[in-house]
Amino acid sequence: MSFKFYSLVLFTLAWAVIVSCDDALTPKDFDEEQPYVQNLVVSPSDINFDPQLDGQKDTTLTFNITVDGFNFGVDSVPYYSIFVGNEDLPSLQRKFPVNFSPITTFQTSISIETNTINFENYTIIVSPTLSGSNTNYAQSIVKQTGVAINAPEILEVVNPDTIQRPAEGQTLVFFEAKVRDSDGQSNLDRVLIRIIDHEVGEAQGSPFEMFDDGSSNNDRVANDSLYTYSLPVTQTNNRPNRDFDIEYFAIDKSGLVSDTVRTTFSIRE
């Protein structure tokens, strides 16, 4: 693979992080006088293995790829490159079959070995050549959701033991949980917290969802695996002193549940 195409790949993968909501894209500054490709379609567009139907096994994926080509000669074809995960070099790189039709649409099918427990991203890049300009390409990203075999883990939790009830206004109390999913962080579904009053039982609406999006519930940093729940504490004449049990746990998209980590928390007048 030439250095210029290698640069194209790195540029494309970096772009994919920024525009990950787009499954397929073509650069907007392509050179219309040179061969170029558009309208890339990859089927299936996503892969979801089912624990009951698929189980845990080696399997073969078949991708059907279709792309429109422009300014190609009668015997010239584009290349396709398949990158698995974050690899820098393609797992597979080949030419499309020759198409002599007046409307140049290139089609092919490719097979990739995987396992149903794997969580992967497949980046498919189609380009007129393997050298030259890093434009005129098309790209698609296919996400594979595997069968989870590992429950999430609560690595660490942090909350104050005791806080002073404010004389006026409110005080925010932060509850934080560091959570890991060995099958991939994207497999995490929810991180939850139970708040249980020693006198009256579990709080209404509990368990509450914790967030790692940098905004909800005053979470400070998005996607740092540190999930946050914030509880406002205000002045009250009703039971100013209260004691709570706190329980943290996480659930993945396959329904596997982490161990529960328990702490305590008190409010004092």
Image (cartoon, grey):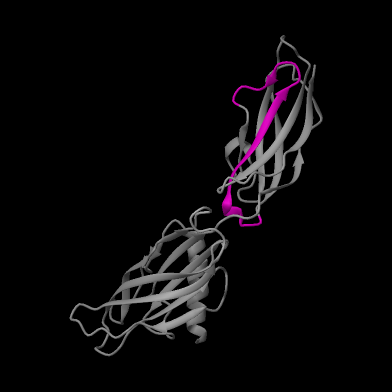
**Residue 184 is inside the magenta segment:** yes
Residue in view at x 46 percent, y 82 percent: 93
Indicate the position of residue 109 as horizontal and vertical percent values. 37, 75
Instruction: Work out whether residue 181 or residue 72 is closer to the camera in this orientation and state it.
Output: 181
**Residue 36 image point, x, y percent:** 32, 77
Residue drawn 78% across and 33% down? 263
Of residues 78 and 8, which is closer to you in this image? 78
Quarter occupied by residue 216: top right
| 117 sits to left or right of 163 | left
Give the x, y percent position of residue 106. Answer: 29, 77
Above or below, 221 against 132 in this view is above
Q: Please indicate whether residue 266 sits to the left or right of residue 177 in the image.
A: right
What's the magenta region? Answer: 182-205
The outermost residue toward the top is 237
Residue 102 image-quadrant placement: bottom left
- Viewer can see residue 159: no
Q: Where on the picture, by quarter, is residue 47?
A: bottom left
Q: Position of residue 148 (x, y in %)?
A: 59, 54
Q: Is residue 251 left or right of residue 155?
A: left
Is there any visible trace of residue 111 in the rendered image? yes
Q: Which quadrant: the C terminus?
A: top right
Q: Residue at x 59, y 25 (%)?
A: 205
Q: Nearer the viewer, residue 57 or 46?
A: 57
> Is 217 covered by the magenta stretch?
no
- Residue 245 vs 255, above or below: the answer is above
